[in-house]
Image (tube, rainbow, N blue to C red):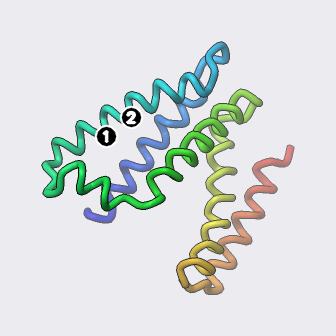
Amino acid sequence: MQMLWPVVLIVLSNTMYNICAKATPDAVSPFFSLSITYLISAAVSMLLYVLSRPEKGIAAQFAAMNWTGLVLGFVLVALEGGYIYAYRAGWNVSVLSIVANIALAVILVFVGVLGYKETLGMKQILGMAACVLGLFLINSK
């Protein structure tokens, strides 16, 4: 269960994420919408931080931070802006996520092997080939 619940949370959240990104009104700037999103996200994150009763206070948390919090902020704006613009360009909800996640999975295999010394076996190579073939099939008309 310890391995399953985070994946369920990711899948359910990602489902709602894509529905919200697709439903963002064209009349609203994606960056204004994301500003509202992040104000709410910051408030919810801080509330969850306080409710989790951390052993270390805010000052200690700041002292323990590294570059990832800053970079992740920029990356999330780019990621979410990309999804909103992709939906506005006409991507279907049923296809965009598949295409983006397959491409991501293939890239992360290389990141894992080159950056984290993970192993790449024949199963992974065949899986990536199947994913790339799937990308061509799903995008062909």
Q: Where, by quadrant of the figure, is residue 132 drawn?
A: bottom right
Residue nearest the viewer, comparing 113 with 63 = 63
Q: Amino acid at mark 2?
A: Ser
Image check: 33 left or right of 104? Answer: left
Q: Quadrant of the C terminus?
A: top right
Mark 2 surroundings within 10 Å by alpha-carbon count, few (fewer than 14), some (14 through 19), many (20 or more): few
Percent position of residue 27, x then y: 65, 13
> Residue at the right extreme?
141
Q: Position of residue 40 (x, y in %)?
A: 38, 28
* Amino acid type of the residue tagged 1 in the rendering: Ser
x then y, percent, for residue 76: 54, 44
Q: Which label is found at residue 45?
A: 1
Compute the Cα span from label 1 to label 2: 6 Å
Extreme residue in the top direction: 27
Looking at this view, is 4 or 65 the one in front? Answer: 65
Count of residue discs: 2
